[in-house]
Image (tube, grey):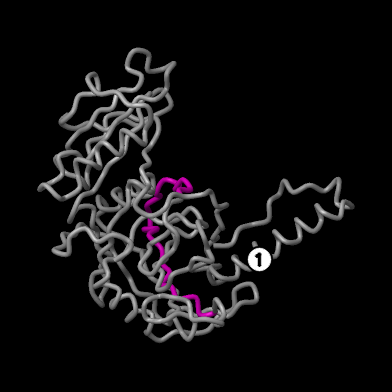
């Protein structure tokens, strides 16, 4: 989760004291974050991990994002020609209001909004609320720059859960399409693959004496190392996933699953990393009961390595994983659980 220095940094006015101080400060921050999450230098696992410039995200539970120039199909439960709103957020919230779990199954799991006044014409403001036959394989109609619609999906209780299968057990992850829709659709693509050869966990760092069992930072302790995380890749050999768009919503908490840079590297956090703010795209969270499996993997034999001057621990034997559909009896557990 470090990134290369910005090639466009100014050079003509380096004599200006304030600008020079600013550049030096930024460089120090970038170097530190690179050290925290940079992969090994081994050719077999060499990876470029980039810090993503933070963009103020919503508070957990208040995300309501979709994908522009993208139209999802599905059976209409509320016709857009009869239901117009002012924004994508309102359209998304209208769908979420029909998927609270308080009155049985979700009546709506897909929303489609027309928000480009010029392109939409008399359809401007239309909000179509729909229901998919399969929420993990939503019916995509069209996408591209000429599409005037913005679409999103909503997962209700027990829905949108995938499993990261390992020899130590399945780590169930609840996806967050309202926060990171592009990321979630990338994960849904993985479900269609016959294999995930090359997908693995390769770095494991415990909570050490820095964070307690609840993931809270211990007063006066450092912020690592160790950095309380399990890092891996979803880059299956022979398969190229679409580049993930930077999306920001929840901060990193215990159980958060987030991309390193723009993927396919990702990590599961064992701690509440408020100090990282919204630096990483969180696309899901591990169901609390399965954090025991995550902790178990981080306890496997590791070896020391040094990434940009910082000591890290990598697994002596990487743990293979694959992504599959999963059903959970735990219901929809929110990030505050």
User: Which percent across, then down, holds residue 236?
Assistant: 36, 58
Residue 29 in which image quadrant: bottom right
Is 312 in the magenta? no
Q: Residue at x 22, y 36 (%)?
A: 139
Q: Residue at x 49, y 65 (%)?
A: 274
Q: Magenta-highlighted stretch: main secondary structure?
A: loop
Query: Which quadrant is the C terminus positioned in?
Result: bottom left
Q: Residue at x 72, y 46 (%)?
A: 8
Q: Is residue 167 above or below residue 262?
A: below
User: Which percent across, then down, holds residue 195?
Assistant: 27, 58
7 on left or right of 258: right
258 on left or right of 85: right
Residue 145 in which image quadrant: top left
Q: Is residue 132 above or below residue 11?
A: above
Q: Badge 1 is on which residue?
A: 31
Residue 109 in which image quadrant: top left
Query: Which quadrant is the N terminus positioned in?
Result: bottom right
Q: Residue at x 24, y 55 (%)?
A: 194
User: Which percent across, then down, holds residue 227?
Assistant: 49, 75
Q: Residue furthest left?
A: 104
**Viewer-closest of 164 and 332:** 332
Magenta residues (range)? 225-247
130 on left or right of 336: left
Q: Residue furthest top?
A: 122
Is 235 in the magenta? yes
Q: Secondary structure at mark 1?
A: helix
**Viewer-closest of 235 and 97:** 97
Q: How crowded is the residue under tag 1: few (<14 C-alpha within 10 Å), some, or many (20+)?
A: some
User: Which percent across, then down, holds residue 78?
Assistant: 18, 28
Q: How many circles with numbers are drawn on the protein? A: 1
């Amino acid at each position: 989760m470090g990134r290369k220095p910005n090639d466009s940094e100014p050079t003509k006015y380096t004599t200006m004291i304030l600008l020079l101080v600013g550049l030096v400060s930024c460089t120090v921050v970038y170097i530190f974050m690179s050290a925290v999450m940079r992969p090994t230098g081994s050719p077999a696992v060499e990876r470029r991990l980039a810090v993503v410039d933070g963009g103020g995200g919503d508070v957990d539970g208040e995300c309501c994002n979709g994908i522009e120039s993208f139209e999802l199909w599905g059976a209409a439960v509320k016709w857009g020609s009869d239901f117009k709103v002012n924004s994508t957020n309102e359209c998304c919230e209208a769908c979420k209001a029909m998927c609270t779990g308080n009155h049985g199954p979700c009546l709506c799991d897909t929303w489609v909004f027309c928000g480009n006044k010029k392109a939409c014409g008399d359809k401007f403001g239309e909000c179509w609320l729909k229901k998919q036959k399969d929420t993990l394989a939503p019916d995509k109609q069209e996408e591209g720059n000429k599409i005037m619609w913005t679409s999103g999906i909503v997962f209700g209780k027990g829905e949108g859960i995938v499993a990261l299968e390992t020899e130590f057990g399945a780590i169930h992850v609840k996806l967050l399409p309202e926060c990171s829709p592009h990321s979630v659709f990338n994960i849904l693509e993985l479900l269609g693959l016959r294999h995930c050869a090359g997908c693995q966990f390769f770095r494991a760092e415990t909570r050490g004496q820095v964070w307690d069992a609840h993931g809270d930072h211990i007063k006066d302790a450092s912020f690592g190392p160790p950095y309380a995380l399990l890092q891996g890749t979803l880059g299956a050999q022979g398969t190229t996933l679409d580049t993930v768009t930077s999306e920001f919503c929840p901060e990193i908490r215990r159980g958060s699953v987030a991309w390193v840079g723009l993927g396919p590297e990702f990590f599961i956090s064992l701690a509440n990393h408020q100090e990282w703010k919204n630096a990483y795209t969180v696309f899901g969270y591990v169901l609390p009961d399965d954090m025991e499996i995550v902790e178990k993997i981080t306890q496997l034999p590791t070896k020391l390595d040094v990434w940009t001057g910082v000591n890290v621990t990598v697994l002596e034997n990487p743990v293979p994983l694959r992504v599959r559909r999963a059903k959970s009896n735990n219901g929809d557990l929110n990030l505050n659980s």
